[in-house]
Amino acid sequence: MSHYFLSGQLMKQEAEQEWYQTSHGTVLILPHRQVMFSDLDELAELSSYLVKNGEQGVALPLKNKENQWITEMGEQRVVAFLLSDRILEQSLEKGHVLATFHNKSHHFQLMNRGESSIQWPDFWFQRIDQLHEWYAETLQREEAPTSYEELLLLSYPYIIGRAGNAIQYIIDVLRDRHVSEALTVCHHRLDVDLMHLGFSPRWVIDHPARDIAEWIRAQIIKNGEKKATQEMDRFIEAYQALRPLSQEAYALIYGRLLFPSDYFDHIDQWTTEKDASVSALSELKAVIDNVLKQERFLRSFAQKYMENLPVIEWLS
């Protein structure tokens, strides 16, 4: 904390992140590469704007003693954020809460708004290429694969096929249809309880369908398909009361759920940690099970919300 005009006690240290308790509240210091917004000046302006407009739980970037956002700490470049708790009113539907956040973010005139676009296919192509490289390297190795790697190899064809379908579907939607909703501030991965709605290091500029799809995915993972369907209907109804969704938005939600992002997130973590333990194998099995649940869920989603929209034939 010596780089900042703050003093505090270290509370927790995890994954290159440090939490400190200070007289101003909890301060998080994390590597700059973990902050998804490219322009920290803009991120600070946006964070302050949302706080002034009543948004709770927003993580505010902090400058160091040199009046800079980025601090050199040894070999690390880090950024500090002042955290505050988010208190959700029990009477408000979560869809209403997210729509309110999107509305406030939309009203803030982002400097790079005109340059932004939906770039999911490009990013997904990169993730597929990374997985393919691992697959090829594993097949060429002389030593036998571990039980964990065997399951990865077995699931590879399905994952690659489904990811490819998702990419082509989104490309077709963006080419053939007019997406009317403006981009807004979204989240890398939205949690079911919206407790991290204001966590600005994970904000991205994207189509609101991203947050809705990731909320649904998290709901399926946490509560299963049946309850997720019920909760989704309430969520979308409450969201649409404030921010109506176009047919194209439903197509984007469908395409994003089709891409098995939780599988790729798991692979990212595994390739970093190289953990092939029994617990890692159990986690991979759970991830694959959730991916299959999402496939089944997409059938009911399409029947309910996509009457006049194209769907993937093998999912019908």
Image (cartoon, helix red, strand yellow):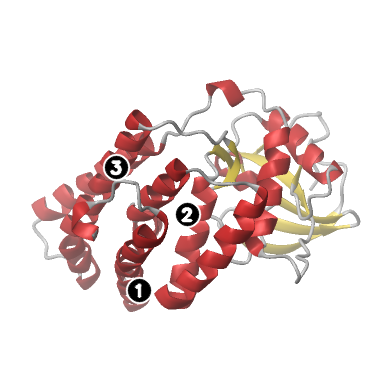
**Toward the viewer: 62 or 176?**
176
- Say which residue label 1 marks: 286
Label 3: which secondary element: helix
Looking at the image, is mark 1 or mark 2 nearer the viewer?
2
Question: Mark 3 and mark 2: span between their CA atoms?
Answer: 15 Å
Q: Who comes first in sequence, dot 1 or dot 2?
A: 2
User: Which residue in the structure is indicated by mark 2?
Assistant: 213
Residue occupying the point 68% across, 57% down: 96
Q: Position of residue 114 (x, y in %)?
A: 57, 21
Kind of residue sitting beneath label 2: Ala
The C terminus is located in which quarter? bottom left
Q: Secondary structure at mark 1?
A: helix
Q: Which numbered marker is on residue 130?
A: none
Please state the horizontal and vertical placement of residue 290, each as a whole percent of the image.
Answer: 36, 69
Residue 296: x and y in percent read 30, 68
Amino acid identity at mark 3: Tyr
198 sits to left or right of 264: right
For badge 1, the amino acid type reads Ala
Taking the spot 40% from the left edge, 57% from the top edge, the residue there is 269
Residue 245: % across, % down = 54, 46
**Residue pointed to by mark 3:** 169
Query: From mark 3 to mark 1, how far is it between C-alphas?
Result: 26 Å
Q: CA distance from mark 1 to mark 2?
A: 20 Å
